[in-house]
Amino acid sequence: MKTTITIATLAAAMLGSAGMASASSIPGMRGHDHTGITVPDMKQAVDFFTEVVGCKNAMSFGPFADDKGTFMQDLLGVDPKAVIEQVTMVRCGYGSNIELFKYTAPDQKNLTPKNSDIGGFHIAFYVDDVAAAKAYLDGKGVKTRLGPLPVKEGPAAGQTILYFQAPWGLQLEAISYPTGMAYEKGAETVLWSPKNPEK
């Protein structure tokens, strides 16, 4: 019960800011196109996203580098001698795309952030059944965490979640809310969901 209340409180805090409308916007902004992730091994990452998660490999390109100038620093804010060996874009169901980068750089750090670290992040995939997702992931040898955890209180009530981890440490989540979430009743802004991508 305490865990459920804690998760609900956390979700309430995160969703609380979602309803705040802003009068300004990037001109023409239509939505989230992709999330970029730097991975240690491109084949391992593509195999995980296509053969385990179920995304589709859309395109690959690269390499990119600038041996003489500061193009990489000016464009991407990385070391001028950084090299993008390969970029691969995958499409995941009805959600936005994921862009995988394989970098080398003189100042590259090999740190995998926890969800609690500044700059830490996770990618969530909507699934129809979190328990079925857990059984599938466990069968594939994927590290899963506590769950499925149903959220029963607060604005996120109605969702069930399960965190899991890619072989190199990337944090991911399976989430489902087949009958919606509590906050939706009377909400001015409803979160986009891949279960109803047209809304």
Image: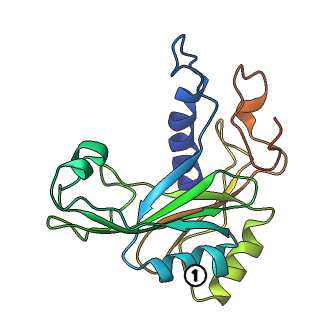
Q: Residue furthest front?
A: 68
Q: Is residue 181 left or right of residue 173?
A: right
Which image quadrant: the N terminus?
bottom right
Q: Residue at 71% x, 81% y: name it.
A: 135
Q: Amino acid at mark 1?
A: Asp
Asked if residue 195 is positioned above or below residue 42 in the image, the reply reads above
Which image quadrant: the C terminus?
top right
Q: Nearer the viewer, residue 131 or 5?
A: 131
Asked if residue 75 is positioned above or below residue 13 in the image, the reply reads below
Residue 120 image position (x, y, % from top left): 37, 54
Q: Residue furthest top?
A: 23
Asked if residue 128 is positioned above or below residue 40 in the image, the reply reads above
Q: Residue at 60% x, 66% y: name it.
A: 59
Residue 188 lies in quadrant: top right
Asked if residue 188 is positioned above or below residue 107 in the image, the reply reads above
Coloring applied to the structure:
rainbow
Q: Is residue 47 left or right of residue 37?
A: right
Residue 11 image position (x, y, % from top left): 56, 42
Q: Nearer the viewer, residue 116 or 28?
A: 28
Residue with the mark numbered 1 = 47
